[in-house]
Each structure stands twice: as C-alpha cells, then as structure tokens.
Image (spheres, rainbow, N blue to C red):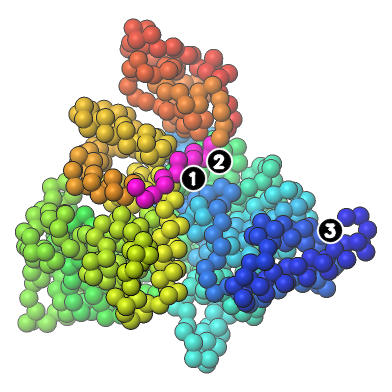
Amino acid sequence: MTIKSEAVSRLKELSEIITKSRVAYFNYNRSDITDQEYDHYISEFAKIIAKYPELADEYKVLDQVGAMPNSKFKKVKHLTPMYSLSNAFSDKDIYNFLKQIRSFLDLSESKSIDLAFEPKIDGLSLSLIYKNGALFQALTRGDGHIGEDVTENARLISDVPLSIPVKIDTLEIRGEVYFPNSTFSELNEELKRKGGKTFSNPRNAASGTLRQFKSNKNRNKNLCFFAYSVGNAPYHLADSQAMLLKTFNDLGFKTNDISKVFTSIEELLQYYEKVFSMRTELDYDIDGIVYKVNDFRLQQRLGFRSSSPRWAIAHKFPAEMSITVVEEIEIQIGRTGTLSPVAKLKPVNIGGVIVSSATLHNRDFIRGLDNKGNKIRDGADIRKGDWVTVYRAGDVIPKIKDVDISKRNSTSGAFFFPDLCPSCGAEVKIDKTDSAIRCYNFQHCEAQVIARLKHFVSKKAFNIDGLGGRIIEEFYQKDLIQQPADFFRLESKSKHGFNFIEFLGKGWGEKSLKNLFHSIEKAKFIKLDRFLFSLGIRHIGENASQILAGYFGSWDDFYNAIKAGISKNDRHFLFEIEGIGQLMVTSLVGFFSDFKEREKLEDLLNYVKIEKFIKLSKIETAITNKKLVLTGTFNAFSRAELKSICERQGAKVLTALSSKVDFLIVGQAPGSKVKKADELGVKQIYEEEFKGLIDYNL
Ligand code: IVH
C-alpha cells in the first residue's frame, strides 16, 4: 500500500467486511467467514492504521465493540507460556533466593547481583500481541498455556496503545491490568443504583470488566495497564529489566514508577518496608513486591522451573487478619479419602474479601497441636462458637491464627473428631505418611468417588466447562456417571433415545445439554501432563504430572514403561527421574497395579486422545534425546546449570551409569564413574569438548 488514497479505500472495504461479519457472528450466531479470514482482515486493517495513524479516528473498526458473543471468549494458545512466580514470605526467603541463584550460576558472594524491584500489582495479567506495530490480539493468562481472547475489550483501555512505533513482525508485551481504587467505589455505587451486583474488590472489578461480554465502554475506560515483561520478540529489546521498562515508556506504555534497581539486599529490603507502609496511599492494590535479576543474560542462564522462573520471586506482604465466630465445624472428604475439618465462619471482611470458611487442617490442629505433637496456640483447642483470628494469604483458603478462649461459652464442649467416615461409615485411620485421618474405602466411599469425578473435570485436568460440583453430584446420584469414561458416553446415550431433559428435569434444556456435550467432545483431546493429573493419583499433583510428561513425552512411552516396570517388579527407572520421590513412586506403582483402577483407565483410554508433551525448547544439538550422566565439578557451570542446559536441549540427565547411557560428561576430580564407564563402554566427554557439542548460551 503506497498511496494514502489507496489506503483509505481499502480501509473502507475492510471496515465493511469486518462489521458485516461481526454482526453476523455476534447477533445472529452465524459465521460468514472463517476465523482465519477474520483475523487476516483485522491484521490487514491494523497494519494500514499503523502506517497512517491519523486515519484511526475516522475508521474506528478496531476499537468498536459490537454486540459481543454470549458464548465464552475464544481460547488461544500462548506463544510462550505465561509463568507464575514462586513466593517468599520473609527476609530469609530472599537471602535463600539469592543463595540459590549464586549456586546455580556458580558465582561467589563477592560478585554482586542487581535486582529489579517492582510492585506486584493485584490485577490480571494480560498479553498484548502487536503485529507490525499494530495491536493484533490481547489474551488473558488463562491456565498459563491457553488464554482468552479479550482483544475487543482491551482496545478500550487507554493505557493499551493501539499501535506502537516499532514495526516488528510479532512483538508480545505482557503486563498487569487493574482497576484503580479511586474509581472503584464510584463503580460499585453506580452498579448498586442500577440494582446490579457489586464487585467485592478492585481485582474482581478488573477481571469482570475485562472479561465482560457486553462491553461497557465507560467502565473499560477506567481500566489501567502497566507493562512489565516481553513474552515474544525476535530480538532483545533491552539488556536488563530496568532498560526494558524505559523501552516500554518509549513505545507508549506506562510502567510502574515505584520500580527501582538495587545492588544491596539490605537496601532492597528497606525499600520493601517503605513500600509496604505506603501501600494504602497507592491508587492500585499490591500484594507484594516482585524481585527480578536485572541482567537479562543472567536471566537467560537461570531459565525456568516447571511453572516459574529461577530469576524472579514474589515477596508477599504479610496476610491480613480479622476476628469472627466459628458457627460450625464440618468434615469434608477429599478425593484421596482425607477427612478435612473446615470451620464455617460468620462471614467477615478480610482485606476486601468476604470470608465464610477456613481450613482447620486436621484433628491435631483442632486440638491445639502441630504435626510433631508440639503445642500451638498455647494448647488451646477450637470449638463451635469460639472467637477466632482468621487470615488469608493470596488466593488460598483462609486459615486460623488464634482462638480467644476468654470469650468461650462455658457450656461449649470440645469437638469430637469422627472415627467413622461421615460419608460411607467405614472406620477411619491415621495415615502414617502424612498424619492425615483417612477413609480407606477408596473404591466405594461415595464422597471420594464424587470428589475424584470433580477433580477429573476440573480446570487443571480435563477442564470440562459446564460441569460444576452440583451437576456432578446430581449425575452421580442419578446413576448417569460412576467413573470418568461415563462422561464420554453421555452423548451416545442421548442419541440412543435416552431423554436427558425429561430425566433431569429442572434447569436443563436443549441448549444447555448441547453445550455440555460440546464441551465434553472438545475435552477428548488432552495433553499428557493434564491427563496424568486428571487420574487423581495420590502425590501426583500438577508438578509431578508435568515432570512425568516431560520425561516420557508420550502416553504410550509412559504406560509401557509403567506396565513393564510393574510386571518385572522394577521401579528403578522411576527413581531416575529428578523430582519424583519415594512416595510418588509407591503411589504410582500402587495405582497402576490395582486391577480395578486399570480397568477404569483402559475404559477411559477408548475415548480420549492424549497429545504428546511438547517440550518448550526446540533446540536440537548433539545431545538432544541422549541420556547423560555428569561426574566431577565443572569450570564454566554449576551442576544445576549444566543439568538445566542439557535438559533444555532435550537430553535426559541421569544419576546412575548403565549401558543405556550415551555419554558420561566428565569434569574435574571425576571419581569412580570414569572407571565404570570404561567397563560399560560408555563414551566419555570432557568439559571443553562438551562445550563444543552444545549451545551453552541457550
Ligand atoms: S513478572 C515469569 N512482574 O504476578 C513471571 N508479574 O505470580 C512473569 N504480577 O501472573 C511475571 N505484578 O499477573 C511480574 N511486576 C510484576 C507483576 C507481576 C503483578 C502478577 C502477574 C503474574 C503473577 C505471578
């Protein structure tokens, strides 16, 4: 497009096409063009606007929001995952954070490491993708891998530039969207006047506004955005976090003005205290401070753990507390049979969130004892009717800090922890591995079976929309679902003449049923790590599932190895996996040796398609897919860094030598492994040669 008049006529054409297809899609539920075509037109439009920004006002297609879809937002895979941060709660945790960094990088105490200090805004993270300088897409974090397309709403935020002065093919900028405190109360008053629901805090207001279907232009205008990182870029925009923030300003983004770089930890911690005490004066909520290694070269060397970077940490503010009354003590039964006591509280506001229940952890906690049998709260127990101090830290379930026995009613009695399972009546026993009180009737205890089904469809497992806790319970009680495979048989049951609507009655209609079948159908394609997690094997949580998926790569490789391991009674290969400990191995073997579990699993496997685990790195070098063992100390790297470099290039680093190992990587003072490698005929590679084989800048 060379001449402006050509640009203008193309813009006219494009606005017509885009508007028409939006109306068809949003108002009449009809797609006249494919999503790809739509995206293509939008991106062409954005490119022209980026070239002739002065036309933006006249041709407003990009920031117009038509009638928005009443279905969910489009799900889009992130170019690179959006990680979370690990948390620190004390100064000691921060010293440890640096110690680990030093050890990973093999840096001595005398070498200083600059840390960038940024407030942790309590909002929502947002990824903004610019194509050739024009805003192309805005995605929420979602589960970190797949986000929701909120482009239309994000375009209305004035802190989000619609175009930026760099014409890079794809540039992804990430940051936090928040609802300012100054306009929050106005918003709630307005909502109240209109008889609508109010938001309990600015974070919810931000989330509700950014993710509303019928966009309210005025409310969106109140949203603000701070940029803090780059998700994807063809080259480095800066050498350090501090420089990056400056670059963001040059590009037209706001960055947080409390941000600063520190060389000394003591000064950094002093600044933390200062910001903590002035936090209520800020126009946005912060729930802690993020520290990031300032130097990007060091960040790159440090890399990521399964879900968080090694180069950053969130120093959380101390939890907020309130005092209230315990109205009831209830026992909930988890999917692994644990009896968890929960205090039902008289609702109380803690730092802007209404809290009505708190965990009581276990029987000992109620009695006033910790896991080791030592007294807590001076040994005071907790009873129905007691006044308690409750606190919440982050999004986790609130906890009880203390009990005020001076206010206790003299007629109250100590809580009696049941010795029979409240759901199935089986005798409960204490589990020596974690001191939990458990119902061991795993197969038949109704509460456990239902909890496992809920887990199976939950967000981090199969993520089936429209199957809330109540529906699962109803389906279970009405005998529609007994085990996971049953979810996938529902639709064919309906096709074979079973009348769900008549059977289920209230609340169900053609549309809700169709939506449910649709989400179940969609869920059949599942990633290996999620699938492993969905099985609900004890001790195999999200993290362990990711480790296993990363190690085995495909379901077949995993399942064959497990089956072979069980039939040969060999667990050795599982112990080789870094991050998979004794308890996990025992639990995995126990699960897959159980005939009933295997039967249910085989049934399920008929319906699902388990996708291979795609490793983040696509870097292929001479060590990709090879098995390595390391020995001795290395000049250029710490053990941990070397291991992480190898893993990023697709190698498996094992601890024990065997004839299956491809290379022994030899450092200084190697020890007995060299001799063993000679005997086994394993090729040995010395550090200098090894550096030539790999790409150690990655
Ligand atoms: S950096 C790779 N910086 O905290 C880590 N995050 O727990 C990228 N957040 O999802 C995050 N302020 O929503 C970073 N200055 C800041 C932040 C920040 C708030 C949020 C963000 C992220 C969460 C991580």
- Which residue is labeled 1 in the image? 309
Q: Is residue 653 left or right of residue 374?
A: right
The reply to whether callout 2 and callout 1 are in contact (CB within 8 Å) is yes
Between label 3 and label 2, give the one nearer the viewer: 3
Q: CA distance from mark 3 to mark 1?
A: 37 Å
Circle 3 packing at 10 Å, graded few (<14), some (14-19), many (20+), is some
Residue, x 28% and y 34% (percent of image)? 562
Q: Nearer the viewer, residue 533 or 511?
A: 511
Element under label 1?
loop
Query: Is the CB–ligand 1 distance for label 2 below 8 Å?
Result: no
Across and down, in percent, residue 199 comes to 47, 79
Amino acid carrying label 1: it is Pro
Q: Which label was assigned to residue 51?
A: 3
Q: CA distance from mark 2 to mark 1?
A: 8 Å
Say which label, 3 or 1, has the lower sequence index: 3
Query: Is the CB–ligand 1 distance for label 1 below 8 Å?
Result: yes
Amino acid carrying label 3: it is Lys
Say which label, 2 or 1, has the lower sequence index: 2
Circle count? 3
The magenta-colored residue range is 606-617
Quadrant housing residue 139: bottom right
Examine the rendering and report whether any part of residue 393 can be seen.
no
Residue, x 55% and y 53% (percent of image)? 77
Across and down, in percent, residue 421 comes to 11, 63
Residue, x 37% and y 36% (percent of image)? 556
Q: Nearer the viewer, residue 41 or 274?
A: 41
266 relative to 29, above or below: above
- Which residue is labeled 2 in the image? 299
